[in-house]
Image (cartoon, rainbow, N blue to C red):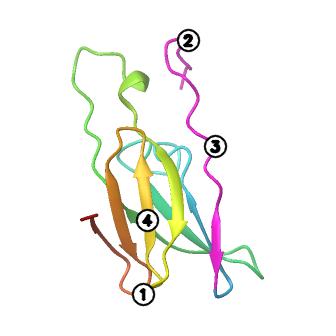
Amino acid sequence: MQKSGSRIPAPADTPVSTGGVRYEQVKNGLTAGFDQMGGYLAAYDEASGQQLWTLKVFDNQRLPGKEGDVQDVFFKSMTLQADGTLLIENERRARLVVDLETRTGTAAQ
């Protein structure tokens, strides 16, 4: 996949760790076999480095006729909340909450 000079690099979000599991954004969903570049969260066992699961946190459909990479949306930040959920904000300022126990995501209130 060729990089575009018009797309700024994806934000450098810091992985979040809790309970022996590291959570981080999948940086290139297309090469990982997913249907879009950004918007995926991956969980890894910290001891072994083994990927445990992935979750599509938000949809990001590309519009035909526009350069694809300028339409890609990535996580801007991830914050572990007091209730054990993960608050994710993306580049378009959408805020989403991921329940790490049930592996589900919803829009933040």
What element does badge 2 sit on? Answer: loop
Question: Which of the two labelled residues, at mark 2 and mark 1, occupies the earlier sequence position?
Answer: 2
CB-based contact (under 8 Å), mark 3 and mark 2? no
- Asked whether residue 85 is drawn in magenta, I would say no
Is disc 3 surrounded by few (<14), some (14 to 19) or many (20+) residues within 10 Å? few
Q: Which residue is mark 4?
A: 87
Please tell me which residue is depicted at 29% across the width and 16% down the height of the picture.
66
What element does badge 1 sit on? Answer: loop
C-alpha gap between disc 3 and disc 4: 16 Å
Please tell me which residue is depicted at 52% across the width and 60% down the height of the picture.
78
C-alpha gap between disc 1 and disc 3: 25 Å
C-alpha gap between disc 4 and disc 2: 30 Å
What element does badge 3 sit on? Answer: loop
Comparing labels 4 and 2, the label whose residue is closer to the camera: 4
Q: Which residue is mark 2?
A: 5
C-alpha gap between disc 1 and disc 4: 14 Å
Hey, what amino acid is under mark 2? Gly
Q: Which residues are magenta?
A: 1-18
> Horizontally, is 98 left or right of 5 in the view?
left
Q: Which residue is mark 3?
A: 12
Residue 42, x across and y down, in percent: 53, 65
Question: Which of the two labelled residues, at mark 1 and mark 4, occupies the earlier sequence position?
Answer: 4
Residue 64, x across and y down, in percent: 22, 21
Disc ID at residue 101: 1
- Asked whether residue 9 is drawn in magenta, I would say yes
Hey, what amino acid is under mark 3? Ala
Comparing labels 3 and 4, the label whose residue is closer to the camera: 4
